[in-house]
């Protein structure tokens, strides 16, 4: 059976139901917004069709069909003391039962869906803009179908890059475009980062496909461990954020001599891809992080901002890996970005919003209608990009559509 949700009806229904249960809170002394707690929405896991105008149709997964997310070569966290409690009992909640922190919107952005992806299942974890205003899209498409797409400023499809060029990404994740319009993509499960030319040609692969492990420059061992996102410093140097599993998960103390660390980390390369340094999140003391899901470089000073998603915190380091500060957040920190004014923003994951922050981590503005598949909603508000007018472009990790958020009367 196929379930179709009308955008307007869903948003109104969610709003009516959510308000009845919402718990309203004022922001802290540094926050100008109020926030509420809303319930979760069932995650379609990418099994969606998106029609013109952004209408979403969800196809439920047959009970007999395994979830592809569970077939990754990366083992789920199971026997580490830091793994989430998977046992369902008294006092525990599943992800579908979690309450989501939703901030009151105050910027007056309009939601639209001018980009149309080819028909097929798969969410869009990441998007990026090049210097020409072309939007690149990274999709979790089935094997044998393109995963990387380029659209022109007129929203028309210009290019698609398939498995014959980049291979198939088992877990398409982050994407960023450098100053030369090269497109960098990460495959968390296959443990590689790929550099693709503006013309869609594979230029370089960092790591070894399917070989998760440690980067040890002294041994000329250059492996990656669940790479999630890439960011670029002011001189073109490259930062790779790693560690989707969990802090000290199953790889720790493994029998594999090339894969001993098993911890979230940042790898710093120069503009030519030469190793400079790396730092880990499981060191004792200040600056701890369990994963580098969000990653952005502060344009004002070159500091490295890390989004530690599952721990609801931002951890800031200097460009060379010296710890500066930790900002504890109320939301999942899925993605980080700096706008044209040099101000920080974050994507709040399954809380379904994009938030403008001050440099103390206080939320001062919000865009998005929370978790869902209606207009302006997101199952997972993850990696996003902003144009020169600070309009936002975002995919949805669990829905195959692209949302454009522009200033104007707010769409409901």
Image (tube, grey):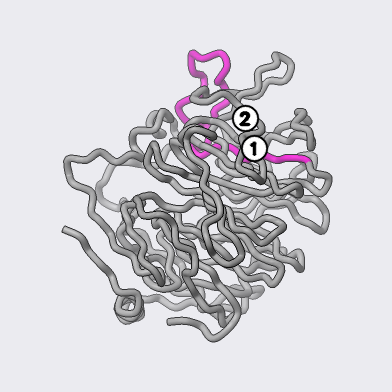
Residue under label 2, please give it.
205
Residue placed at 45% from the left, 27% from the top?
Answer: 250
Residue placed at 73% from the left, 36% from the top?
Answer: 268
**Residue 270 found in image quarter:** top right
**Residue 237 found in image quarter:** top right
Q: Is residue 39 left or right of residue 133?
A: left
Residue under label 1, please give it.
195
Q: Is residue 163 above or below residue 341?
A: above
Check the image and name the residue furthest to the bottom: 409
The N terminus, quarter of image: bottom left
The C terminus, quarter of image: bottom left
Residue placed at 58% from the left, 67% from the top?
Answer: 154
User: Is tag 1's residue or tag 2's residue first in the polypeptide sequence?
Assistant: 1
Q: Is residue 344 visible?
A: yes
Which secondary structure dominates the residues rendered in magenta? loop
Give the alpha-carbon distance from disc 1 to disc 2, as whole Å.
6 Å
């Amino acid at each position: 059976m196929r379930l179709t949700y009308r955008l307007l009806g869903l948003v109104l229904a969610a709003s009516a139901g959510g308000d009845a249960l919402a718990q309203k809170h004022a922001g802290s002394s540094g926050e100008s917004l109020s926030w509420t707690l809303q319930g979760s929405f069932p995650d379609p896991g990418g099994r969606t069709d998106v029609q013109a105008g952004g209408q979403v149709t969800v196809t439920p997964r047959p009970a007999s069909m395994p979830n592809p997310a569970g077939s990754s070569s990366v083992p789920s966290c199971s026997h580490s003391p830091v793994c989430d409690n998977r046992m369902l009992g008294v006092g525990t909640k599943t992800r579908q039962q979690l309450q989501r922190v939703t901030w009151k919107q105050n910027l007056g952005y309009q939601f639209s869906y001018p980009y149309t992806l080819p028909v097929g299942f798969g969410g869009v974890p990441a998007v990026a803009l090049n210097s020409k205003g072309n939007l690149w899209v990274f999709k979790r498409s089935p094997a044998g179908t393109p995963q990387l797409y380029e659209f022109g400023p007129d929203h028309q499809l210009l290019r698609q890059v398939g498995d014959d060029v980049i291979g198939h990404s088992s877990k398409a994740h982050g994407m960023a475009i450098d100053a030369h319009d090269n497109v960098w993509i990460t495959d968390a499960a296959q443990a590689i980062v790929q550099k693709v030319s503006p013309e869609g040609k594979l230029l370089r692969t960092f790591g070894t496909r399917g070989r998760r492990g440690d980067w040890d420059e002294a041994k000329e061992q250059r492996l990656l461990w669940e790479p999630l996102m890439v960011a670029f410093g002011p001189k073109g140097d490259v930062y790779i954020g790693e560690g989707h599993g969990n802090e000290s998960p199953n790889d720790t103390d493994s029998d594999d001599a090339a894969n001993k660390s098993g911890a979230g980390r940042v790898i710093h390369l120069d503009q030519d891809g030469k190793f400079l340094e790396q730092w880990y999140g499981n060191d004792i003391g200040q600056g701890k992080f369990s994963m580098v899901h969000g990653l952005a470089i502060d344009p004002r000073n070159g500091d490295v901002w890390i989004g530690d998603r599952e721990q609801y915190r931002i951890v800031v380091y200097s460009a060379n890996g010296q710890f500066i500060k930790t900002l504890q957040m109320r939301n999942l920190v899925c993605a980080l970005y700096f706008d044209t004014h040099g101000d920080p923003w974050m994507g709040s994951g399954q809380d379904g919003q994009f938030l403008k922050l001050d440099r103390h981590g206080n939320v001062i503005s919000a865009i998005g209608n929370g978790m869902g598949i209606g207009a302006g909603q997101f199952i997972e508000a993850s990696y996003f990009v902003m144009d020169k007018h600070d309009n936002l472009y975002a995919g949805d990790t669990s829905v195959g559509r692209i949302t454009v958020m522009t200033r104007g009367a707010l769409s409901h």
